[in-house]
Amino acid sequence: MNEKPDFYKIASNEIDKILSGNYAKEEKLKALCDCLAHNFELYDWVGFYRVREDDTLELGPFTGEPTEHKKIPMGKGVCGRAFLEKKTLVIGKVENEENYLSCSPKVKSEIVVPIYKNGGIVAEIDIDSHHENAFDEKDRKFLEITAEKTSSLF
Ligand code: SME
């Protein structure tokens, strides 16, 4: 039998290693982006946005093509909405979204997962895919656990 490797497990172990490593927080965030992007074929762009005091989301470390959306106002796009709605947003087809900020015409689906600290959202994990419906319930749970683990980096 030719079983598919469990990429969630492989990535989860790598994430734990990265987090326990002895290097700077910013480097850890970048290593996490790389880890997610290389383990999951459908994760084409992986990045962190930080919540700033001026009510914007600011792009942090990311893996993938550069984006023009370095600062996102609250409520704008999927990232800004996930913050206001205080929940993970899974968008199967970005073309159906009215309130959406496009980074590239190649992007077809997206997931945004809030990262909480002391009861508030301090950052978000944002992942884009070049495939429609790339993110299912398993991705959502895995990324919410990952978000919890990364909270100490913010
Ligand atoms: N699509 C996001 C903007 C960020 S890029 O995906 C990197 C949004 O609608 O908020």
Image (cartoon, rainbow, N blue to C red):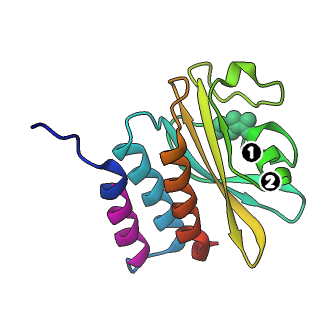
Image: 52 above or below 45: below
Q: Residue at x 42, y 44 (%)?
A: 37
Q: Quadrant of the N terminus?
A: top left
Residue 129 screen position, x and y as percent? 52, 31
Residue 67 visible, this angle: no
Does label 1 point to a residue whose CB lies under 8 Å from ligand 1? yes
Q: Write down the residue under mark 1.
A: 79
What element does badge 2 sit on?
helix
Image: 92 above or below 26: above
Q: Residue furthest front?
A: 1
- As drawn, the label of residue 114 is none
Q: Residue at x 62, y 28 (%)?
A: 92
Q: Write down the residue under mark 2.
A: 83
Kind of residue at disc 2: Phe
Which quarter of the rendered image does ligand 1 occupy?
top right
Query: What is the crowding at mark 2: few (fewer than 14 residues within 10 Å), some, or many (at least 20)?
Result: many
Q: Residue at x 66, y 46 (%)?
A: 112
Q: Residue furthest left?
A: 1
Front-lying residue, 41 or 103: 41
Image: magenta residue range:
11-20
Image: 69 above or below 131: below
Front-lying residue, 3 or 18: 3
Give me the C-alpha separation between circle 2 and circle 1.
7 Å
Question: What type of secondary structure mainly makes up the magenta span?
Answer: helix
Residue 59 screen position, x and y as percent? 68, 51
Kind of residue at disc 1: Cys
Q: Residue at x 72, y 45 (%)?
A: 70
Q: Is residue 69 a member of the stretch shown in magenta?
A: no
CB of mark 2 within 8 Å of CB of mark 1? yes
